[in-house]
Image (tube, grey):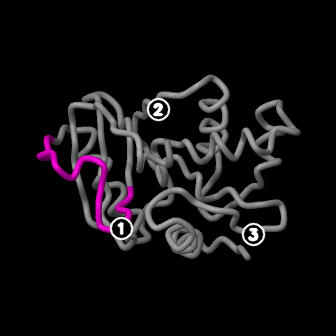
Amino acid sequence: MQSGNTLHDESPYLRRLLSPIGRIELTSDGESVTGLAIENTGTLPRDNEDEHSCAVLDDAAAQLTEYFAGTRRSFELPLSAAGTEFQRSVWHELNQLPFGSAVSYADIGRATGRPTAGRAVGGAVGANPIPIIVPCHRVLASNQRITGYSGGDGIPTKVWLLEHEGITHR
């Protein structure tokens, strides 16, 4: 799974919105946000399905619109991300990162008790099914270089998000 862009989310609720980085597709189980996909090469995973929104998706769309407008720095949404215990621990650490700050993969590894698990951390970051809201774009190499991004159009999408938050990168 790549940042919600390749996994077909079976959640019954679906809402799309426009953003500066392309169309965004949100999914929900009716209680929590379960996925966020960023348009890649003009398509979204569930483009062939009709939208069927719910209150949590309406709230998520409003908060994302505020984030892109520069008036929101954190999200207050119930989230439900399917993953392994290790992946969920990495995503928990990502959710602790404040707007405008970045960490390294090694920092996340240390925070999850696996200081030498750089590749595993990178895999978990890349598997994040709710990017932006769970801010995987805030993870950089220890030299502040961008090593990749699986959401949207890849590195250009990550660059836009980092610059939007004023995060220094190389």
Which of 99 and 114 lies nearest the eye of the viewer? 114
Reading the chain from its start, which is encountered first: label 1 or label 3?
A: 1
Q: Earlier in the sequence, mark 3 or mark 2?
A: 2
Q: Nearer the viewer, residue 76 or 108?
A: 108
Q: Main secondary structure of the magenta part?
A: loop
- For disc 3, the marked residue is 145
Residue shown at 68% from the left, 56% from the top: 139
Counting from the top left corner in percent of width and height, residue 164 is at 52, 73
Query: Is residue 46 magenta-colored?
Result: yes
Q: Which amino acid lies under the numbered mark 1 shown in the image of this protein?
A: Thr
**Residue numbers of the magenta segment:** 38-52
Instruction: Check the image and report above or below for 46 versus 84.
Output: below
Residue at left 38%, top 58%?
A: 38
- Amino acid type, residue under disc 2 in the picture: Ala
Q: Residue furthest right?
A: 116
CA neighbours of label 3 inside 10 A, class few (<14), some (14 to 19), many (20+) = few
Q: Which residue is mark 1?
A: 41
Q: Residue at x 59, y 48 (%)?
A: 126
Name the secondary structure under disc 3: loop
Q: In the rendered view, would you say 167 is above or below 27?
A: below
- Left or right of residue 47, residue 150 in this image: right
Q: Given contact means CB atoms under 8 Å apart, are the residues at marks 2 and 1 in contact?
A: no
Query: How much space separates mark 1 and mark 3, taking CA atoms?
Result: 24 Å
User: Which numbered marker is on residue 88?
Assistant: none
Amino acid type of disc 3? Arg
Crowd band around label 1 with a 10 angstrom C-alpha radius: few (<14), some (14–19), many (20+): few
Which one is in front, 67 or 40?
A: 40
**What is the x, y in percent for residue 51?**
14, 46
Q: CA distance from mark 2 to mark 1?
A: 25 Å
Mark number displayed over residue 81? 2
At mark 2, the secondary structure is: loop
